[in-house]
Amino acid sequence: MDPSDARRILEEERGRGRALIGRAGSIEELDRTKTGVLGRKAPVSEVQRSIGSLPENERRELGRLTNEVLAELRAEVENRRAELEGGADAELLSADAVDVTLPGRRPRPGSFHPLTLVEDRMVDVFTRMGYRVAEGPEIEDEWHNFEALNIPLDHPARTMKDSLYVDVPGMLLRTETSAVQIRTMESQGPPVYVVAPGRTYRHDTPDATHGTVFHQVEGLAVDEGISFADLRGTLEAFARELFGTNTRVRMTPDYFPFVEPGCQVAVSCFVCDGAGCRVCGNGWIELLGAGMVHPKVLENCGYDSERYTGFAFGIGIERVAMVRYGVNDLRLFVEGDVRFLEQFEGVA
Ligand code: FA5
């Protein structure tokens, strides 16, 4: 290469390279430009390779100039790289910026199921009276669900019509929480004061007031000298706590094999105070069955029925929830419709 051509190329490349490097708009573009101006095939590199074949006197001079141009272009590339990287950081910062003054998204609070709310409330009333909570299995044997409760083999409650049996012989889904009475008395001696909330199953045809799966709270008190008056007083106190201080309790005779005497218990309607309205019909709302524990039941559990007496009751939780929240069909409780359930947010 002619030394004067070499000099011209170097000067041209100095200007062209600086301009190209300055125009590179991204790191990728800058890398491509760098290959074009400083790479193996770049004009400056060609000049560099030809230096060895130049005459001695030109060699030193052109070598110095080549190195100078190379160093300058390399420095330009690094400056531009620093600029572009700074710009990328700034862009990232502004794209990712968080506006700390924006109001946060409020998390939606969940809520308890209305049946849970009512069950908790009922259990709370009794635990404050000194009762403790007892539990039993939902799959029961015939002894606890029937025999020990004085329900003989020929009792209609034993037939498949009312009960849901499982594949294991002699086992069924408990038809009432009364089975927990037996389990409790088998596990401890008197005195007993327990409430047993839980799920119960019956082969009932579902309608607005009957479920196949529903819930009860069983109550059992056994001690010396317990009378029917204690049962009445306890249920009155419960009804007043749950439905208001003016609530009256009505007991009408009824038959349950495990109590004697037995009764149905209704409370005066908290909407019309007993006058009769759309909620109650005749002024009274039937809520539960109750009675004095049958001596045979006490004896089945090894209790001395001459010394101890007791009362028991079984309250339908769905029925209480219907009354309390003005719900006219208990199927709403199990359908899981959020529009229904969200109305109970914040309700106690
Ligand atoms: C009983 O289950 C007795 N074990 C109650 C009892 C306990 C009596 C202790 C005496 C001593 P009954 O079948 O009436 O009784 O049911 C009691 C309550 O459960 C009813 O008043 C009602 O509120 C509710 N209940 C009964 N069947 C259903 C059903 N299919 N769906 C929803 N609730 C029901």
Image (cartoon, rainbow, N blue to C red):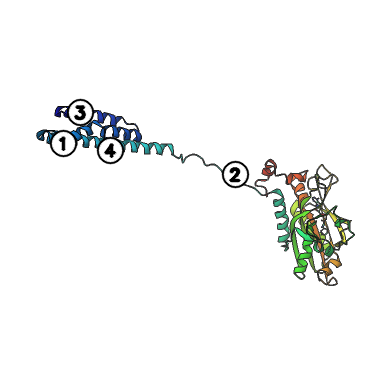
Number of marks drawn: 4
Q: Are marks 3 and 1 in contact (CB under 8 Å)?
A: no
Question: Pointer 1: residues within 10 angstroms few (<14), some, or many (20+)?
Answer: few
- Quarter of the rendering containing residue 312: bottom right
Question: Pointer 2: residues within 10 angstroms few (<14), some, or many (20+)?
Answer: few
Query: Between 32 and 228, which is closer to the camera in this rendering?
Result: 32
Q: Quadrant of the N terminus?
A: top left
Q: Secondary structure at mark 4?
A: helix
113 lies above or below 44: below
User: Mark 2 vs mark 3: which is more N-terminal?
Assistant: 3
The residue that label 1 is drawn on is 52
User: Mark 1 vs mark 4: which is more N-terminal?
Assistant: 1
User: Mark 3 vs mark 1: which is more N-terminal?
Assistant: 3
- The amino acid type, in three-letter code, at marker 3 is Ile
Q: Secondary structure at mark 3?
A: helix
Q: Secondary structure at mark 2?
A: loop
User: Mark 4 vs mark 3: which is more N-terminal?
Assistant: 3
Q: Which dot, 1 or 4, sits closer to the camera? A: 1
Q: CA distance from mark 2 to mark 1?
A: 79 Å
- Quarter of the rendering containing residue 224: bottom right
The residue that label 4 is drawn on is 78
Q: Measured from the top left, where is residue 232 in percent x and y?
A: 82, 59
- The amino acid type, in three-letter code, at marker 1 is Gly
